Amino acid sequence: MEGKTLEDAEIDLLLEDLLEMYGYDFSDYARASLKRRMNRLFQLDRFPSFAEFRFKLRSDPEYLRRFVAEVSVNVTEMFRDPLFYRTLREEVLPVLATHPLIRIWHAGCATGEEVYSMAIMLKEANLLHKSLLYATDINPNALSKLKTGIFSATPMRQYSDNYRMSGGKLDFSSYYTAHYDRVKFHDLLGQKIIASTHNLVSDSSFNEFQLILCRNVLIYFNKELQDRALELFDQSLESLGFLALGAKETVRFSSIAKKYRQLENKEKIWRKIV
């Protein structure tokens, strides 16, 4: 039955299974994107029927991990949107420097390229030693990669350009050791990273932070789930703390909007004012 795609009713059934059996709630994800990724997996693994796909998902924990890894979004890069990072470097880190302990939460961090970007900036600002970087994602496979600090060497030239445009002054390659087609970032950068699974849909706040970054995750949620995630961030952010979102994301039109003021340069960074 090559070429078959999942019907809406079949996707609904799978989403109910995932919630009832495993506690994964994808029901409020943007439907078109979710459907596209589920169909891609269905066809990639060559299931002859929806029934076999469903059985595999219900009965094989290892396949569940694969499903979550494939369906959740893991697109990220280092120093993505360099002007955003320049703003963090020049306007946010000097404020964070006034705290005796800096707690930063990267929510939906995928494989952690942005977490390592932050660790590099904190080191250059002489703040890494008093910082904790909480890196969370729904996908345990992505977090496993983050913990190794090992990434593909292919995009390093682009990452080096991003780093330089963000205000970086050093040789970007000084932060990693290259070995064939992989690079390993220095252990010093990973020592302050605490990686853990966390579901923005169902899990609660677990600490209080001065900076929360959740970039290019909310665009995959519908309005209700976006509001729920923003409420969670608000509960987790100290007064006068900073919330950073992706280029196409905003706190406007949300229930927390009145409590936040966007930085004047219009990067997608808001400060909690109450």
Image (cartoon, grey):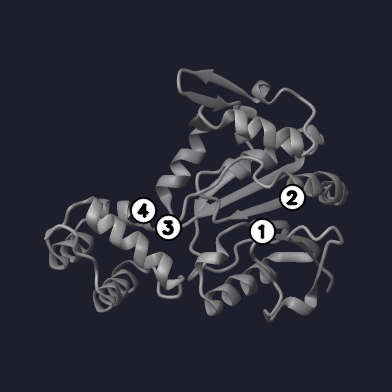
Q: Which residue is mark 3?
A: 72
Identify which amino acid the numbered label 3 is placed on: Ser
Tell me the residue at 79%/39% (across/down): 127
Tag 1 or tag 2, which sits nearer the N-term?
2
Q: Is residue 129 visible?
A: no
- In the rendered image, the vertical position of residue 159 relative to residue 222, given as above or below: above
Question: Tag 1: Cα neighbours inside 10 Å, few (<14), some, or many (≥20)?
Answer: some
Is 149 left, or right, of 171 in this rendering? left
Residue 189: numbered disc: none
Residue type for callout 2: Phe
- Judge from the rendering whether residue 175 lies leftward or rightward of residue 67; answer left or right: right
Q: Is residue 108 above or below residue 174?
A: below
> Can residue 162 be seen?
yes
Q: Earlier in the sequence, mark 1 or mark 4?
A: 4
Q: Alpha-carbon distance for marks 1 and 4?
A: 23 Å
Residue 247: assigned label:
1
Q: Which residue is mark 4?
A: 70
**Looking at the image, which is closer to me, 260 or 38?**
38
Question: Which residue type carries mark 1?
Answer: Ala
- The residue at which mark 2 appears reads as 84
What residue is at 74 percent from the left and 33 percent from the top?
A: 164
